[in-house]
Image: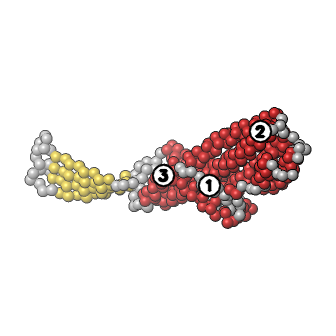
Amino acid sequence: MKLTAFRRQLLICAAGLGIALPAYAADAADAAPARSGLAQALEQAWRLHPQAAALQGREAEARAAQDVAAGLTPEPGSLSIGSRSDRLYRNRGMQEYEVELAAPLWLPGQKAAREAEAASRVDAITARRAALRAELAGELRDAWWTLAAARNAKLLAARRLDTARALEADVSRRYKVGELSRIDANLAQSEVHAAGAELIETEATLLQADQALRTLTGTAAPQDMAEEAPKRLAQAGALATPEAHPLLAAAAAAARSARARVTVADESRRAAPELALRMVRERGDFAEPYANTVGIQLKIPFSSSAQVRREGSAAQAEADQADAEMLRAQTRVRLETERAQRALDAAERQLAMAQERLALSAENLRLSEKAFSLGESDLATLLRIRAAAFDAEAFLDRQRVARAAAISRLNQALGVLP
């Protein structure tokens, strides 16, 4: 029997169901463009991040604090100039000029504590920048694979609509010549409407996902959105260390900075003492010559126990909170790593099952279209089997994206940037 146009169309559809979409290839040759694509997107997103510029200012502030701590005095010195005379009431020539140079002094141990605290602030800001970049990478990865899934769904919906239109045209022709019933024609037309509605829905979802990624990066996503390098999965066996994981490094640096502030509070139990050099030039009347005197003055402020307790307690509370947050961050990273590894294992198993399901669905579709062309099966059965085949292909595509997203989530849990 000669193949009809309808049968040729169904054979093309069946062959298409066995072909995987190439947008998510996982081999090492395709992995490099994916990494560069995600890495480039991360750079663009970082340039647009609202807190990136603020961190530069905070780092400049911390480095200025370092310069202050390295200075000879805890605060800038001061210059006082004064003058006295009897011109307004006696006018006998009494005149006095006074110049005073005053400089605050470091308390014992205060300078070293301030230097350590300023250095810890710089380290904390540097670690915070890395942690913020890692958090942005996680947000970008989620948006990246959401867009990839939306693109996949839109492509599949478009293919379903094209196949439904081809089927509806062939069924309509055969209905007009009396080979098929009006019910078959209505079923084919209903399939076109359903496929069209699905395409509209996927286009709206794609637009939303694309705008979410554009909000982060400011540019459109590349067409090639391949998965990250699988070789990073070797890191999943060892938990991230504070030195390697950005979030743990930031928590540890914040804890060190808080403890350094406690040390500063302990070494600053009173205001800084002040040493002054006084120079006086004076005379008693017009007949006397000017006399010059030089003196030294030391001012030692008293200590307030209540103020010391207030500042020390506040610093200790911040240190305790920072230590607790560091422990929580370690627990969270460990649990997220374990969860991400299990999710990746599950995604790989589901991907294998999806591939087997697609093979069975493609075979069923091939047999069904052959039976329909021979008159051994009705259109409703063919449409049901074809819908199952499309579902199997959609499930396979979703599992490919899910596996790629699981790799990204595991890399994110390990603190690995794109």
Q: Is residue 17 above or below residue 197?
A: below
Question: Which residue sits furthest right?
Answer: 376
Q: Nearer the viewer, residue 146 or 173?
A: 173
**CA gap, disc 2 to disc 3?**
63 Å
**CA gap, disc 1 to disc 3?**
30 Å
Q: Which residue is mark 3?
A: 53
Q: Is residue 204 above or below residue 262?
A: above
Picture quarter with the C terminus: bottom right
Name the secondary structure under disc 2: helix
Q: Amino acid at mark 1?
A: Gln
Q: Which residue is mark 1?
A: 223
Q: Which residue is mark 2?
A: 172
> In this view of the protein, can residue 34 be seen by the observer?
yes
Name the secondary structure under disc 3: helix
Q: Is residue 94 left or right of residue 209?
A: left
Which residue corresponds to the image point at 72% horizontal and 55% vertical from the top-left?
21
Q: Amino acid at mark 2?
A: Ser
Residue 96 image offset from top left, x and y in percent: 19, 51
Q: Residues within 10 Å of mark 2 (few under 14, many from 20)?
A: many
Which residue corresponds to the image point at 83% horizontal and 54% vertical from the top-left?
359
> In this view of the protein, can residue 265 be seen by the observer?
no
**CA gap, disc 1 to disc 2?**
37 Å
Residue 198 image offset from top left, x and y in percent: 71, 40
Tell me if label 1 and label 3 are in contact, CB under 8 Å.
no
Which residue corresponds to the image point at 46% horizontal and 50% vertical from the top-left?
270
Q: Nearer the viewer, residue 353 or 137?
A: 353
